[in-house]
């Protein structure tokens, strides 16, 4: 009987990623400019054609739920203040530049648009200042008491809020959505917390999962969609009560006649207590502080 041949082997790293080869293969396709073709022999989790089938939609739901959840947890993001509003409100400095160009052009429609942008640009500044207040205060608190700014990750009001947090050196989250007209994240979202979603439903779920307050600045269909989903969840007790602040009382009271809804009996009078109007960044932050006794 021959003695056993003991050979020296290289110790293996327990945390080594054993799946890397599958993704390296896909990367090679891209680098070589070769289109991917359906391939039955490809590993299932590394097969884009398989993962994008109608039958695997449930798996994609799970992935869009899990990835941002794990990444936020790793960065210590447990409590957030969600800020949403119009993507079309520019920064004041950009609004002024557009106005100057419009005046030079002499085109009446271009000038009217530029004047409206200047008028609405103050909401950008207010969202920026509000985020600075939240982020600046939270940076000095214990980790479990910190509130992080979260937005939809896009331009306008969303950019302003991420910018305010960025300016004081705080982390902030961006939950962007892939749209037919490509929308890229604003440059102020913390890179490790910059997420992109395919499904609106999963994106809105993530907006609510960690939310301890929601601040709705003037906006369009998307803002209304998010606002009324939140109000409905709290009204039906599917979510715990949180401060829901409508920033810009003149806009919101002109847009939605909540009193008419009470008069017609489609909501109860006490439902009007689910939200409140605010007009200054300090007032919005004070409302949140009162709610949580901060």
Image (cartoon, grey):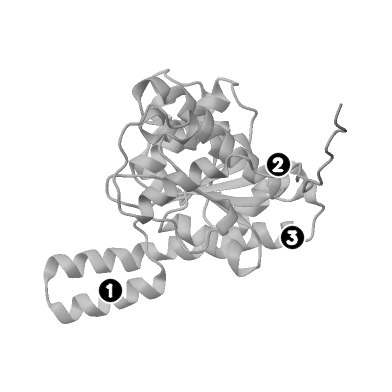
The percent coordinates of residue 64 (x first, y second) are: 51, 35
* Residue named by callout 2: 291
Q: Residue at x 66, y 67 (%)?
A: 169
Q: Position of residue 69 (x, y in %)?
A: 61, 38
Q: Kindly report which numbered mark, 1 or 3, lies closer to the viewer in this rendering.
A: 3
Q: Residue at x 64, y 38 (%)?
A: 210
Indicate the quadrant where residue 180 lies.
top left
Camera-side residue of 102 and 2: 2
C-alpha gap between disc 1 and disc 2: 40 Å
**Pointers 1 and 3 in contact (CB under 8 A)?**
no
- Disc with the residue nearer the chain's start (3 vs 2): 3
Q: Distance between the Cα atoms at labels 1 and 3?
A: 36 Å
User: Which of the 4 image quadrants contains residue 266?
Assistant: top left
| Residue name at image x 35 percent, y 44 percent | 254
Dot 3 falls on a residue whose secondary structure is loop
Q: For mark 3, does the 10 Å Cα neighbourhood hold few (<14), some (14 to 19), or many (20 or more) residues?
A: some
Quadrant, the N terminus: top right
To which residue does mark 3 refer?
139
Query: From the viewer's perspective, is the residue at label 3 or at label 2 nearer?
Result: 3
* Dot 1 or dot 3, earlier in sequence: 1
Q: In this figure, which residue is indicated by the disc labeled 1?
A: 98
Q: Quick one: SS at disc 2?
A: helix
Residue sitting nearer the eye, 266 or 52: 52
Task: Tell me if 246 is positioned left or right of 130 in this view.
Answer: left
Name above or below for residue 174 compared with residue 115.
above
Of callouts 1 and 2, which one flags the residue occurring earlier in the amino acid sequence?
Answer: 1
The image position of residue 157, as x and y in percent, is 45, 56
Q: CA distance from mark 3 to mark 2?
A: 19 Å
Q: Quadrant of residue 206?
A: top right
């Amino acid at each position: 009987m021959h003695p056993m041949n003991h050979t020296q082997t290289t110790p293996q790293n327990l945390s080594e990623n054993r799946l890397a080869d599958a993704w390296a293969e896909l990367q090679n396709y891209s680098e070589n400019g070769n289109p991917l073709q359906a391939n039955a022999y490809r590993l299932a989790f590394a097969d884009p054609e398989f993962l994008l089938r109608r039958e695997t939609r449930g798996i994609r739901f799970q992935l869009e739920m899990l990835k941002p959840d794990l990444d936020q947890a790793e960065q210590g993001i447990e409590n957030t203040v969600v800020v949403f509003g119009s993507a079309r409100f520019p920064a004041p400095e950009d609004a002024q530049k557009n106005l100057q160009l419009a005046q030079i052009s002499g085109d009446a429609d271009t000038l009217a648009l530029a004047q409206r942008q200047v008028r609405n640009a103050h909401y950008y500044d207010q969202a920026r200042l509000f985020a600075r207040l939240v982020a600046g205060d939270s940076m000095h608190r214990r980790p479990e008491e910190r509130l992080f700014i979260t937005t939809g990750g896009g331009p306008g009001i969303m950019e302003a809020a991420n910018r305010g947090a960025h300016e004081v050196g705080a982390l902030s989250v961006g939950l962007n959505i892939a749209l037919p007209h490509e929308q890229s994240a604003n440059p102020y979202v913390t890179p490790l917390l910059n997420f992109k979603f395919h499904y609106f439903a999963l994106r809105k779920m993530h907006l609510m999962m960690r939310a301890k307050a929601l601040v709705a600045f003037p906006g369009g269909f998307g803002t209304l969609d998010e606002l009324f989903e939140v109000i409905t969840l709290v009204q039906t007790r599917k979510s715990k009560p949180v401060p829901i602040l409508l920033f810009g009382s003149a806009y919101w009271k002109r847009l939605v006649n909540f009193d008419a809804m009470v008069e017609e009996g489609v909501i109860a009078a006490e439902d009007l207590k689910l939200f409140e109007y605010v007009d200054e960044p300090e007032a919005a932050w004070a409302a949140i502080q009162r709610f949580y006794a901060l």
